Amino acid sequence: MAVVKVYSTPTCPWCVKAKQYFASKNIPYTDINVAVDRNAAMEMVQKSGQQGVPVIEIDGNIIVGFDQARIDSLLGLS
Amino acid sequence: MLQLKMKKQEESVKSSIYDLVIIGGGPAGLTAGIYAGRARLKTLIIEEKIAGGQSATTEHLENYPGFKDGVGGIELAMMMEEQSKRFSAEFAYEKAISVKLKGDTKEIILSSREVKAKSIIIASGASPKKLKADGADKFHGKGISYCATCDGALFRDKKIVIVGAGNSAIEEGIFMQRFTKDITFVQDLPYLTAEKILQERIQNYSDTKFYLNTLVKSVNGNDRVESVTVTDRKANKEYQIPADGVFVYIGYNPITDFLDKQVKLSEQGYIITDENMKTNIDGVFAAGDVRVKDFRQVITAASDGATAAHSAEKYLENK
């Protein structure tokens, strides 16, 4: 099973959409709220070079934004 | 027997044609979907990104009637989406690439398939204008954001610059005050254009700074944003504003590229309609931010959507 992390903020609609997508495909994920966890926020910026959410990590691969095509290809979804 | 079979085939072809296809699932498109569903029109709503459109990225809406304490943008969008589904509107979450609007049967080419419709409502909305300044591309997503609601929390106790001073800019500025006190607005006009109540609220915070009549010249830094250079047009003077993040709210561009100029547009690129949301093409209507109008709000988009659905229903009845 792939390890999926979603770096998100509670007020970001694309984060909601991404999490809904994983739920709809029955893919377990860890939600990391970078609005409260500053260390996680720094980790996210370091890993992605981005100061924007969502950032999604699938088995160490970084996806910036809700890029469904890349998510599908990394998870082998059609 | 053969005739019966042919008739059945014909019916099934006919039934795959939608009475109404709505392009765009913001407040205009979703409201049109609610009214069309209740009129028992076979309706498809096409949304490329996220239901609610721009309103979904607004943290809190205070001026939408019925919610006395306000309502979250994404929350309202999801309620509208559920409501239109309740009245049987179908959804396709993909991009409308092109359309053929002339004639009785309209065609809409999506990323994965083609759909046919007897009538169309264009409610594709508008997208935020990008900042035109040196460094704007370099720092996109790396300190420059178009959604404070999404990314604001990453700038806790940082220095931020907000470009623009309309409703969206000021609303997001008020949102940002929960994270940082160091907020500077840069506005090209000599005054703020937001609603008076919003202006009063933002000006109550004495820490907030304003540069009016001022343009952004460049966003500077090595790996991350460090400052913004602005030019005061009147004084013809340059200032350097220290900044960790830049949020941009300088207006919108209508999304009409997929129409390939088949519908009559204004000089600014917005769709021209009459008061019943009719465009220059029979059976094609437009609603919400994408059409020519003075006041672009969630409530006026919803109103357009209701009117457009009603006009589409009348059009289909009279065919």
Image: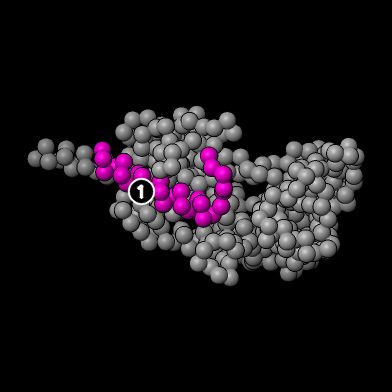
Residue at image point 11% right, 37% down: B3
User: What residue is disc 1 on?
Assistant: B310
Residue A5 higher or lower than B223, as above or below:
below
Residue at image point 54% right, 54% down: B298
| Residue B109 x/y as whole percent | 43, 36
Residue B259 higher or lower than B180, as above or below:
above
Number of numbered labels in the structure image: 1
Q: Nearer the viewer, residue B14 or B81?
A: B81
Classed neighbour count for the residue bearing mark 1: other residues with Cα under 10 Å, few (<14), some (14–19), many (≥20): some
Decide if residue B134 is in sight here.
yes
- Quadrant assignment, res B64: bottom right
- Quadrant assignment, res B278: top left
Left or right of B203? Residue B98 is: left
Residue at image point 82% right, 52% down: B210
Which region shows up in magenta?
B292-319
| Residue B220 x/y as whole percent | 86, 44
